[in-house]
Amino acid sequence: MGTPSDVMTLRETVWPKKTSRTARYSSSWRIVITGVLAIVFFAPFWWMVVISLLPNRLVLSFPPQWFPFHPEWRNFFLAWEQPYFARYLINSLLVSVAIVIGQLMTSSLAAYAIARISFSGRRLVYWVLLVTLMIPGQVTFIPVFLIMKHLGWIDTYQALIVPFIGSAFATFWLIQSFRQVPQVILDAAQIDGAEHFWIFMRIILPLNKSALLSIAFLNFVFHYNDFFWPLIVTQSNSMRTFPVGLSYLIASDGSGTMWNVLMASTLIGIVPVLLIFFVGQRFLVQGISSAGIKE
Amino acid sequence: MSLVGSTGREKKHRFQFPYRWKRELTGWLFVLPTTFFVSLFGVGAILYVLYLSFLQWNLIDPVKKWVGFHNYQLILQDSSFWQSVFRTLLYLIGTTGITVPFALFIAVCMNKTFHGVRLFRTIFFMPYVVPTVASAVVWFRFFSSSDGLMNAIFRLFGLPPQGWLSNYHEALWVIVLLYVWQFTGYFAILFLHGLQNVPDSLYEAAAVDGSTPFLIFWKITLPMISPTTFFVVTVSFIFSFLSFDQIYVLTEGGPADSTTTLVYDLFEQGFEFFHIGIASAMSIFLFLFLLGLTYLQFRGESKWVHHQM
């Protein structure tokens, strides 16, 4: 007795784990149903992979090929060599990284002020943010387009980045998170003579790493995938982002002459979001499940 | 808080702001960038679009003609506008009506921890992460009317091949199906979060009373997760209301406008026909509709939702 494992066995004898027959039975049908559905949900991805590795003459064959027995890796090179393809990817990465960095800087500062500094504009700014939260891009794209046109920014990186630098959504999220830092810590720092900016940099930001990461990952994915605004504001191939560029590849190849290369292009383009997804899944899931519920 | 004012580290001879001023200044400086961008591209843009909705203008003409409420009149009298409103509602109900119950079902299945549950969660969530345009590529291959997989399967079972995306009555439902694939996993994770917050004691009490699983689901689970359900339904309404990518890539609003929803109509008016005034008036409609939805959520939540004490 006395070691942690002993305590564990003691606990299990007092409160035995539920492994009755019905429980085991009910969890096995759960696995079966969930498994079947998971296969259905995964099928489109698998199919994407299979088609991207098939020679073109087999793409339309029936019954469909469900496994690429002779993978043609060449398709991926062909996809990569398409004119402007690499440029689309670089644009998307550049734009979404720039937006995320900008958002993190502006919204964390604002969130700190609203959550932790009692100044006169606090309530007003809070309400402005709340109203903005309800305005989607589909409602404001005409005026924002006109503003960009007025600035001469159409078809530039500025037009793709600047409208998204201020984010009501990110700010709200961080306000929630910053409010949970115990006031005692901040009081102690202030008594020691710390300025607000110092507290912000040295205490608030390090303590809220996971909230900041959640925001960064979610918004990276969102802006990497964004289609509507880049479609409107870009005109030349050298400015198009990956989703817009891909839609042009579909349009120019919609009849399906080169399905395998199209699928390969799609797969290459979704690698960044899938990487982010697998690396940051914990933060993404934690993010989306707390964002809405706690308001 | 007032402690701080008297314990500054600064040297005496340097000029010092009174503490209150300094706090005000810091506060405003911190919120300045966000407030600037958000006011310009959010609230400011709404006011700008309101102004544009009173104009007759084609984006290029130097003359902007003030026409008052004429654009609103035009829209309200236009039967194609009402048709796109109707289609939007149909799409809204179709997507939400399928996706939300389906997501709840998957969440209930995944609620018990078993081997591989994390893998399943990852798979269900993956479609949400991938850009819509990329998913649309697969949908093209699936639902092509000439050589798509769906028609191949139909032929195998001796069913007549369908037009899918090129059929007036079917195109919208193919897009609904894409929505279901994309968002079910996302909503299932939201539900899962709600399910895990239901206290075990309730289930244990019900088990002691000998309730059937169906009764437990109906009388305990469903009322307990109603805040989540309400949130998910609202989010789904908003997502499908604003759907654009799917429609643009798969059908461009066709065939014969059968997939032209409000947002797509708005896009066409603005950026294909350059009817800036009309498009702006439609934006205002869209905004009012969303405000209404948000209001309903606030109202409905207090009425329908069971909040845990």
Image (cartoon, rainbow, N blue to C red):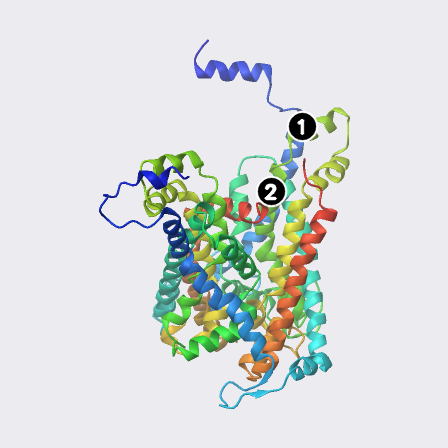
Is residue A171 or residue A87 the one in the foreground? A171
At x 66%, y 54%, the residue is B233
At x 55%, y 39%, the residue is B117
What distance separates the C-alpha of mark 2 from that of mark 1? 18 Å
Q: Which disc is residue B265 wearing? A: none
Is residue A117 or residue B262 the one in the foreground? A117
Query: Which comes sooner in the sequence, label 2 or label 1?
Result: 2
Q: What residue type is labelled 1?
A: Ser
Q: Which disc is residue B192 wearing? A: 2
Q: Which amino acid does label 2 sit on?
A: Leu
Residue B260 seen in the figure: yes
Residue A52 seen in the figure: no
Q: As displayed, is residue B236 above or below residue B173? A: above
Mark 2 surroundings: few (<14), some (14-19) or many (≥20) residues within 10 A = many
Give the SS element for disc 1. helix
Q: Which disc is residue B201 wearing? A: 1
